Amino acid sequence: MKSHSPLQSFPTLLCFLASSILLQLHPVSSNPAEIYETCGNEFSCGRITGIGYPFRGSEDPAYCGYPGLELRCDQSSNVTRLNIKNMTFWVLDVHPSAQTLRVAREDVMQNNCPTDLVNMTLDYTLFDYSTSYINVTFLYDCLFNIPNVVFSCGNNSLSVLPGEVGAGLCKASVVYPALQTGDRGSFNFTGLDQVLRQGFDIRWIVDTGICNECTRSGGRCGYGGGTNQNENQTTCFCPNQPYVQSGACSSNSSPPPSPSRGTQASK
């Protein structure tokens, strides 16, 4: 019985790994009509309804949404979640025409203060802050008394100041954006936990011009060209040939008889 050396089996292992990666990168279906139907799904979860490209639900294929804009639905609580820079946010509201989301950090929604002692950071390739917020600094377990809002946060003694303040002689400093409640630079600390849970607005900066052109022509928006993963851009999935376009579908591409756009709640 012949035995195989580790060197002989190494190419086989490489082929297996390459195949696994390709299966993850490419869509499950290569049927253009099915891609067109799948990317017609709209995300709905609780009060968040009818959200389409550049977002997608977690159950939709990756090519139906822009990278990094995946929405997840907790059906038991009807909470919509979005991950930004490895931090989980609750999506409280969406305004597609203004391209804005109202979000709040999950730790704030579940407590009366940030329990993850890290500053919030946006992915600036995808989002930017709106103009209606002010930064608030939470200082944890300071070695001196700060004459401002002080309350307990778990096992920590917590002081709150407007603006951005470094940790200094405190255990940690966490800067958190909150909705502006008065003139620029002012903030009302009354009912701070409720204010934080109102969230703050961010704007997605993905160019939707191609998508608008696509939907007006009867197409459905996606990313990466469906079966052509070399197209790292917003693309238009059309009902008939040519199935994938960089802009609008051609005039002879009319939708085949099929059910209307679906709406799903994604987990």
Image: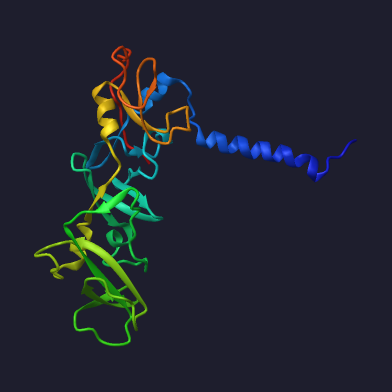
Q: Quadrant of residue 200?
A: bottom left
Q: Quadrant of residue 107?
A: bottom left
Which residue is located at x 22 percent, y 57 percent?
199
Can the viewer see residue 119? yes
Q: Is residue 187 above or below residue 87?
A: below
Can the viewer see residue 61? no
Residue 192 in picture, x, y percent from top left: 19, 67
13 sits left or right of 146 in the view? right
Residue found farthest to the right: 1
Residue 151 in picture, x, y percent from top left: 24, 76
Q: Quadrant of residue 254?
A: top left
Which residue is located at x 16 percent, y 67 percent?
191
Q: Is residue 134 above or below residue 103?
A: below
Comparing 214 with 257, the one in front is 214
121 sits left or right of 96 in the view? right
Which residue is located at x 39 percent, y 35 percent?
233
Number of labels in the image equals: 0
Comparing 134 with 246, the one in front is 246
